[in-house]
Amino acid sequence: MMARYLHFRPPLEAALLFAIIVSAAVRVRAFHIPQSRPIHKVSLHASTTDSNNDDDDDLWNADISPLQQQRQRHNSEEQYDWTWSILPLPEHADNTSIAERARCAMMSSSTNNHHHHSNNKQPAALQDRCSVNLDAFHNGRCKAQWLHVDPPVLTVDNFLTEQECDDIRRITISPPPAGVGRVIKLESRLSESNKSNNQGTAVRLSTTWYVRYGAPQVAPLLRSLMQLLPDIQLEQTEEVQLVRYMGEGQGFGWHEDALSEQEATMDAGGQRIATLLVYLDDCQDGSGRTLFRDLRGGGKDGKQCRLGVSPKKGRALLFFPAISTTASIVEDDNTSTTDDDEDNGAFGNVYFDHTRADHRTTHAGEPPTGQNGQKHIAQLWIHSGIHTPVVFGRGLNRHSEAVL
């Protein structure tokens, strides 16, 4: 019928009408139709698992990480200490020496990060990373807590109020609330068979909404971020992403947030140096955790378990996918020490922005429990430099539109 209608129009008028129809269809598809997007840095595929079995080496069908390989290779050599590059909380340390090192790393240092200008004293464990204002979220309502010392992993309970979480979650309902404007909805349906490099592709089953900086519902999230990381600029952040995992089949296998050298461009703002996740709801029976493959937390009866963070409405999780190496680069005349014996493969190549990926932050998103179980998170990635937003098109989503 449309072809017959166009047939009886003058050629120029028919061409213009056809262009308008196609343009409208594209806009509708951008909002309503799921699209796949590539996910990099794979190790394994996701599956449901017993939440209590978090120290099982077969969890998530895990490949053995470089650190675990080093550990196994040298476990018969008493003089080799693989734990030198990982510091758990003092109470979770294997011996008093590691516990003391962890305590010292958590104490404030008079030396600030070399690339920051804050007067705040930072714990030694946060050197070469973003300055973190722990005092801003250690009050009657909020509670900041260290979960791991090096690499640093921290949580802040009540980072957002319940109402603020509900307001953000409503963006995922169609149509979205007034004032949100255009959002972009994408479906991630990637499996182990999708191989993009020698590491493959991490399985991710989820739905993602990209949200404009100017959406009023995300204003509390952005304001709290600026309080928590006082030395960063909003222009260093990627577009706000809301992610939903629905049912026991949806999760995100082991992966890193750090970008490849091809992805960490000047336009992108360089490497991702910090990840902030905020859980927008609770999950049934403690499911839906964020698990760190190579890090250890407290367990029962003295047994060390894989570090996991359970979703709690309003709780923020902060960690650092990469470290700054400005000082060492200056000393070494820009030479890279990638994957040498000194760091046992814990860090990646030195990039143009003087950063190195911290492979120790490899993590996974555990599926929520129950047929109708859901997990919603808001996530922000912070770059080493100014990030150019491109998801909505250049110039169509500006940091300056944020309501701070």
Image: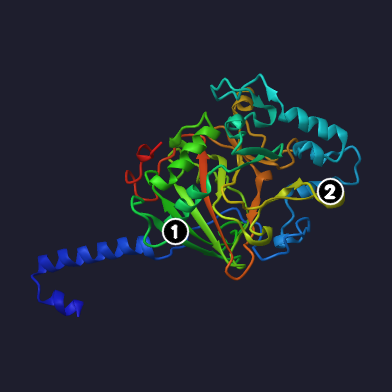
Q: Nearer the viewer, residue 183 or 155?
A: 155
Q: Residues within 10 Å of mark 1 (few under 14, many from 20)?
A: many
Residue 172 numbered tag: 1
Q: Residues within 10 Å of mark 2 (few under 14, many from 20)?
A: few
**Vertical arrangement, residue 67 with respect to residue 4, above or below:** above
Left or right of residue 389: residue 96? right
What kind of element bears circle 2?
helix
Residue position marked by numbered label 2 in the rendering: 73
What kind of element bears circle 1?
helix
- Residue lying at the far front in this picture: please name it: 140
Q: Nearer the viewer, residue 397 or 65?
A: 397
Amino acid carrying label 1: it is: Thr
Which quadrant of the structure image shows residue 3?
bottom left
Residue 304's spot in the image, x, y percent?
A: 81, 49
**Vertical arrangement, residue 154 with respect to residue 9, above or below:** above
**Vertical arrangement, residue 80 with respect to residue 58, above or below:** above
- Examine the rendering and report whether any part of residue 269 can be seen: no
Name which of mark 1 and mark 2 comes first in the sequence: 2
Which quadrant holds the N terminus? bottom left
Residue located at (62% from left, 33% from top): 138
Which quadrant of the structure image shows residue 364?
bottom right
Residue 99's spot in the image, x, y percent?
A: 82, 34
Residue located at (56% from left, 42% from top): 159
- Examine the rendering and report whether any part of residue 314 can be seen: yes
Residue 236's spot in the image, x, y percent?
A: 47, 37
Q: Nearer the viewer, residue 12 or 95?
A: 95
Residue located at (75% from left, 35% from top): 342
Residue located at (66% from left, 65% from top): 47
Left or right of residue 21: residue 136? right
Amino acid carrying label 2: it is: Arg
Residue 218's spot in the image, x, y percent?
A: 44, 45
